[in-house]
Image (cartoon, rainbow, N blue to C red):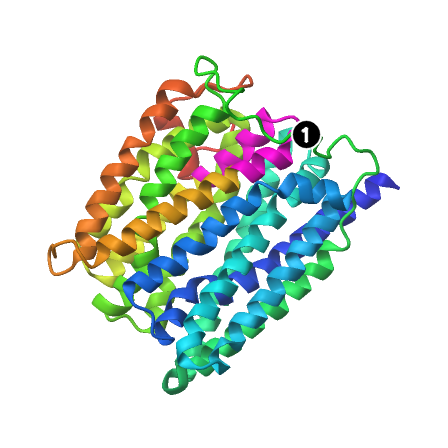
């Protein structure tokens, strides 16, 4: 009976992933264009991309308490997902508000959307950790991510076409796609109700939270050192990330279809390559995969400075998506490998906390700098990209010096990893 419930839960998690991808494809790439249509300035975009993650970061500190108060991970997850669907519906309705209130309401509801989405993540991750055996996690999450990526890209393309049809009445187009996103999240809610939660309390948090400072041991170099590198990397990334959309729409004069390609082809490649990265992480270790990602991520903003050609930038985003896939699967596997089951809620919450804090600091600083930096090759955004690249490179040092594998893994050099990820050599072969 329990085995059948686990199979049903795994199937439900895949369907939930499809519904989530439809929601995300309709909403996430178009938050910045929606805000611009509501009259946002670059500083307003900075607030849109910084205040929601800040609110989310601090709410993550209460994730364990929420799970404990409700008594089950599943209840906490469903509450957060329902709230996220409601926030999307409210964001769509911002088009009906007076102009002076619409943008503020949209930013506030985006904050609720972000908080709820991040609160749903840790309890979901705990349940999935109960279903999938350690030796198959990388492969399963990679396979699920491939499916999610294809659906996300298709949804983003469809949303772009819808906005193109409503070009002369753009706000109505944004109303439609955000309302549709809310409906997709409700479908996701339904599939999550089918997931099974074991009656034992082994996976439940114990209320102590994550004693981060007391666990700091630089000689062992586990989660604390890695989280420090992650904070530096994400803070420098979000210094420029919120403004790629502004650059594409304002400086490059992209239409919605080309904008969608530039904003979505990266996430698509992330999802498509995550299964391959997952297999590599299972074999060669999550730390080796993370080191590859941290070394290559600083190249992305540099590549963006070389040309304004749409096709060239699309290739850069393909490269970016592949490398960020390594980062995501490496972090996912490392937390599962390092944290015991009862601590995973706390560690996933803390990971989201530092990510939100980094996004707040980076986006707010980027919004302030965007209008003050001198123009390089016709745009101050280029200068911002150089700063972002330099700061991303600094994040590599703590990871390389302090973080080590926590389990026995297969040895292999960079060329072997490259041959496997490129498909010239099978994983494990």
Viewer-nearest residue: 239 or 331: 239
Viewer-nearest residue: 133 or 36: 36
Q: Which residue is mark 1?
A: 341
In the visual, does 369 lie left or right of 34? Answer: left
Query: How far from the left and from the top, in percent, is residue 374?
Result: 12, 55
Look at the image and say whether residue 334 sits in the magenta stretch.
yes
Task: Please report the residue visible at 40 percent of the width from the left and 80 percent of the height from the top.
Answer: 99
Viewer-nearest residue: 272 or 78: 78
Which region shows up in magenta?
Answer: 327-350
Q: From where the camera sits, is residue 125 visible? A: no
Viewer-nearest residue: 415 or 404: 404
Look at the image and say whether residue 347 sits in the magenta stretch.
yes
In the visual, does 37 lie left or right of 301? Answer: right
Q: In the image as oriented, which residue stretches furthest toward the right?
A: 1
> Which element is circle 1 on?
helix
Query: How far from the left and from the top, in percent, is residue 377?
Result: 10, 57
């Amino acid at each position: 009976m329990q085995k059948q419930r686990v199979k049903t839960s795994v199937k439900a998690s895949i369907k939930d992933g499809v519904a989530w991808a439809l929601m995300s494809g309709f909403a996430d790439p178009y938050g910045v264009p929606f805000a611009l249509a509501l009259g946002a300035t670059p500083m307003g975009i900075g607030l849109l991309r910084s205040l929601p993650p800040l609110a989310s970061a601090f709410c993550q500190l209460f994730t364990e308490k929420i799970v404990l108060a409700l008594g089950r991970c599943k209840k906490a997850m469903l509450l957060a997902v329902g709230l996220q669907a409601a926030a999307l519906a409210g964001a769509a309705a911002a088009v009906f508000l007076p102009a002076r209130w619409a943008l503020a309401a949209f930013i506030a509801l985006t904050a609720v959307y972000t908080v709820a989405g991040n609160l749903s993540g840790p309890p979901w991750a705990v349940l999935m950790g109960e279903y999938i055996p350690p030796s198959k996690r990388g492969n399963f999450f990679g396979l699920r991510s491939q499916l999610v990526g294809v659906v996300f890209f298709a949804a983003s393309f469809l949303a772009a076409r819808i906005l193109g049809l409503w070009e002369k009445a753009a706000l109505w187009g944004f109303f439609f796609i955000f309302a549709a996103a809310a409906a997709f999240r409700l479908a996701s809610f339904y599939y999550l109700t089918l997931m099974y939660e074991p009656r034992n309390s082994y996976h439940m948090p114990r209320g102590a939270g994550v004693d981060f400072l007391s666990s700091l041991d630089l000689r062992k170099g586990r989660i604390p050192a890695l989280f420090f590198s992650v904070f530096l990397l994400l803070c420098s990334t979000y210094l420029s990330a919120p403004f790629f959309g502004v650059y594409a729409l304002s400086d490059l004069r992209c239409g919605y279809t080309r904008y969608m390609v530039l904003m979505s082809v990266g996430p698509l490649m992330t999802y498509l390559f995550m299964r391959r990265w997952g297999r590599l992480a299972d074999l060669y270790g999550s730390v080796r995969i993370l080191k590859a990602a941290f070394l290559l991520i600083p190249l992305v903003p540099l590549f963006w400075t070389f040309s304004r050609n749409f096709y060239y930038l699309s290739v850069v985003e393909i490269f970016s998506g592949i490398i960020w896939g390594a980062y995501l699967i490496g972090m996912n596997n490392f937390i599962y490998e390092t944290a015991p089951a009862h601590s995973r809620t706390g560690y996933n919450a803390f990971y989201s906390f530092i990510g939100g804090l980094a996004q707040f600091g980076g986006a707010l600083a980027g919004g302030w700098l965007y209008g003050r930096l001198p123009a390089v090759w016709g745009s101050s955004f280029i200068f911002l990209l150089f700063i972002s690249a330099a700061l991303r490179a600094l994040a590599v040092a703590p990871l390389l010096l302090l973080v080590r594998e926590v389990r026995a893994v297969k040895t292999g050099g960079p060329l072997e990893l490259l041959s496997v990820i490129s498909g010239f050599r099978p994983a494990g072969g």
